[in-house]
Structure formats: structure tokens, C-alpha cells
Amino acid sequence: MTMPVVLDGTADMLMIADHASNFVPAGVMLGLPPAMLEDHIAVDIGTDPLTRALAALLSAPAIIASVSRLVIDLNREPENAIPAASDGHVIPGNWNLPEAERALRLTAIHQPYHVRVAAEIAGRRPIMLVSIHSFTPQLATRPDEPRPWPVGVLYNTDDRAALPGIAALAAYGLHVGDNQPYSGRDLNYTMNRHAEGAGIPYLGIEVRNDGLRDAAGIAHWAHVLAGVIAAVRRQLGPV
């Protein structure tokens, strides 16, 4: 069983990073060159150190995934969680995957992850959830569609935290993606399940990963996002 990293904290929010790791457990054969595990198809680049920095700045608890999205995508419905291809790259080990292996990844990784998220929410009763992701500046499969937003906010039907978050980011002079570079109405499984499903406001943040490639970039975005998250939490009002 592969469990997430859980950081303790006293703030009345919970941070979640579904795609923070490129780790492939022993026995899982993806059939990819090792270099591909450093690519955005395997991990949301920069989100592990960014989430840790935010948790420290905000004294916030955090759940940080510890397995690659190519093994199983924790932010997808169970039936769609094991990708056969990503951004034009075939994942050979996931093609024609035996049902026993598919079931094992679900029961050993996907299910325990979401059970842990639900347990942390039940125990901490956070006022707000914060989801941290990153995106690539250019998809290989869509070379004619640049992604100019340095940061985006994703949400589905609950925009109580999203709209103040967009406004707070714009106040920094940023070109903010409102449900860009893709829509939270399409790709939002973790927040749909644990936030929208429980009536908890949430802020889904996507940072373009060319801003998260070094320590200076991590520090910059941690400073900006800590201020934004704190401002949104204040706007949500008293407990």
C-alpha cells in the first residue's frame, strides 16, 4: 500500500497535492524511458516543494501524493484512473493491463488515498480545501494552443473560494486563467468528491510549471499563493 505524505498544521484549512510525485512502486512496469518520469505527464512539476512551502507559511496541514499519476491518477474517477497514453506518449505497461493489476492499483493506492483525505477532513473539519497542481506551458499534442496564463483557478459548481481567488491573483497583476488551462467542470475528481460533495469551499490552483523549476520560483509562488489563500480564507468569514 502506498500512502500519501501527511503534514500536520493548525490552520483551519487542508492543502492537497494529487500529482506531486513521480514515484513508481516496485513491480509496476510502465515501459517508459526513465527520463519521461521527469516530464509533466508523470508529475505536476514543482508541486511537492510548493505545497510544503505553503504549508509552512500558513501553518496548514497538507496531504501530498506519493505515487506517479502514470501508475494511477488520484484526481480521476477510478474507472478512468490508469492512463494508456498521455500528451501523445503511449504508456506501454498500461495497455491491456490485466484486471488483477488494475484492481491492485485501485485497492492499494487510489482507494487508501481518498480514504485518508476523507479521514483528515472528518478529523480536522477544515473551513476550506486548497488543491495545488501545475501545468505545462505547451502540450505536445496541441502545438497551436499556447497557454499564456502563469496561474489558473479551477472549479466546478462551487465558486465561493474560486472567484475571490481569481480576484486576489489578479490584484498581483497576474493574467489569471478562469477555469484555464482546462475546466474544473471536466477535471475535478478530488475536489468534486471531498469538497463539493461535502459542501466545503475550495480553491483549486494551477501554476504553470516553468515558474516552478528552481528554488527561487518556488519561493516566489509560495509567497504569492500564501497571501492569496489567506485573503480567500478571510473572505469566507468566521467559522
Image: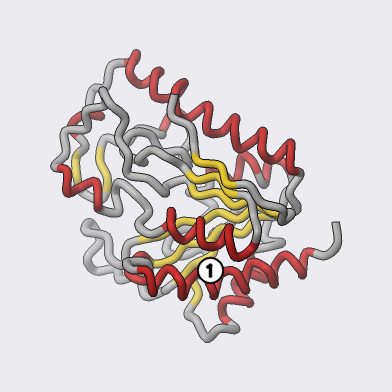
Residue found farthest to the left: 33
* Front residue (pair 71, 159): 71
Residue located beneath label 1 in the image: 178
Residue found farthest to the right: 238
Q: Is residue 99 left or right of residue 204?
A: left
* Front residue (pair 228, 156): 228
Image colouring: secondary structure
Inspect the image, locate mark 1, and give the three-letter code of the amino acid beneath it. Asp
Residue at x 53%, y 27% (from the top left corner): 112
Q: Is residue 226 left or right of residue 217?
A: right
Q: Is residue 188 left or right of residue 182?
A: right
Q: How many marks?
A: 1
Residue at x 36%, y 21% (from the top left corner): 102
Residue at x 46%, y 38% (from the top left corner): 74
* Residue 184 percent coordinates (x, y): 53, 54
* Residue 152 percent coordinates (x, y): 49, 67
Secondary structure beneath disc 1? strand
* Residue 75 percent coordinates (x, y): 48, 42
**Up/down of 145 relative to 62, above or below:** below
What is the crowding at mark 1: few (fewer than 14 residues within 10 Å), some, or many (at least 20)? Answer: some
Residue at x 46%, y 42% (from the top left corner): 65
* Residue 110 percent coordinates (x, y): 47, 30
In the picture, residue 69 is in which quadrant? top left
